[in-house]
Image: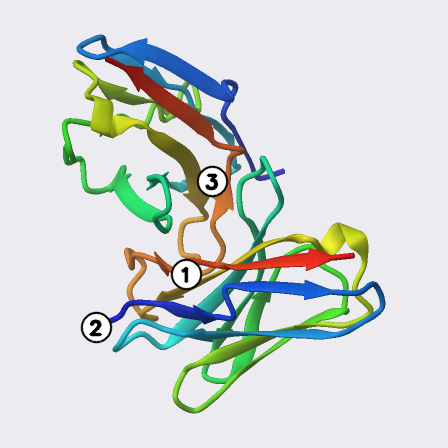
Amino acid sequence: DAGVTQSPTHLIKTRGQQVTLRCSPKSGHDTVSWYQQALGQGPQFIFQYYEEEERQRGNFPDRFSGHQFPNYSSELNVNALLLGDSALYLCASSLDGYLNTEAFFGQGTRLTVV
Amino acid sequence: AQRVTQPEKLLSVFKGAPVELKCNYSYSGSPELFWYVQYSRQRLQLLLRHISRESIKGFTADLNKGETSFHLKKPFAQEEDSAMYYCALRGSGNTGKLIFGQGTTLQVKP
């Protein structure tokens, strides 16, 4: 099991562009959460997907959207990129239905907006 | 407001010295508390959680509801403990978001 995999690992975009980041959860996991980690900060929750629906959302603008596919993989889309969107984007997967479930993290996608 | 505070950005100790990484939280309810660790060039991984009451790699953490703290401790630091440590909380009954602190870099010197 490769665990949680994210692609791409690095990305450079220009202000105003749109970006799509991808995440494949750990085998057997059905829930995917996305986090943004700015330099020197802890991860901040963006949203969580379960059964192809956004179940919970953090304090992020509508420019941030996502999708979950029937195979539980997920995409994070960011529109109208701002310089401040430059960060490490982390995907975490878990198994729903268990309150004590552990979240497993991917290695992240480093997004640089220039 | 739900918040996790790690007051130290950097903690530097010598090998064999005791370590205490501080974590305070703000949450109106019964949270679940976690410590996550990120070693150099590795992904974020769970170190321990308060409900397990276990010791992992010699680390322990006790939830103190009176002081709203969840400090991470180890009696004798090892060089391989050098890493970034994040304290996080999750609301009880909430299968979703983790709220992380800003992290503390632990540097264990030989």
Secondary structure under tag 3 reads loop
Q: Which residue is mark 1?
A: B95
The label nearer to you, 1 versus 2, is 2
Q: Is residue B20 left or right of residue A40?
A: left
Secondary structure under tag 2 reads loop
- Residue lying at 40% horizontally and 56% vertically, measured from the top left: B93
- Residue lying at 55% horizontally and 77% vertically, measured from the top left: A75
Vertically, is B25 above or below A54?
Answer: above
**Observer-nearest of B60 and A23:** A23
User: Badge 3: few (under 14), some or many (20 or more) residues near its Cα, within 10 Å?
Assistant: few
Amino acid type at circle 2 is Asp
Q: Chain of mark 3?
A: B
Provide residue B51's location: percent of width, then percent of height.
24, 41
Provide residue B109's location: percent of width, then percent of height.
29, 14
**Observer-nearest of B11 and A64:** B11
| Contact? badges 1 and 3 (CB < 8 Å) | no
Amino acid type at circle 3 is Gly
User: Badge 1: few (under 14), some or many (20 or more) residues near its Cα, within 10 Å?
Assistant: many
The label nearer to you, 1 versus 3, is 1
Looking at the picture, do discs 3 and 2 lie on one chain? no
Q: Which residue is mark 3?
A: B29
Query: For the N terminus of chain A, which image quadrant?
Result: bottom left
Provide residue A95's location: percent of width, then percent of height.
31, 70
Q: Which residue is mark 2?
A: A1
Q: Is residue A96 left or right of residue A68?
A: left
The label nearer to you, 3 versus 2, is 2
Provide residue B82's location: percent of width, then percent of height.
31, 27
Q: Earlier in the sequence, mark 1 or mark 3?
A: 3
Q: CA distance from mark 3 to mark 2?
A: 36 Å
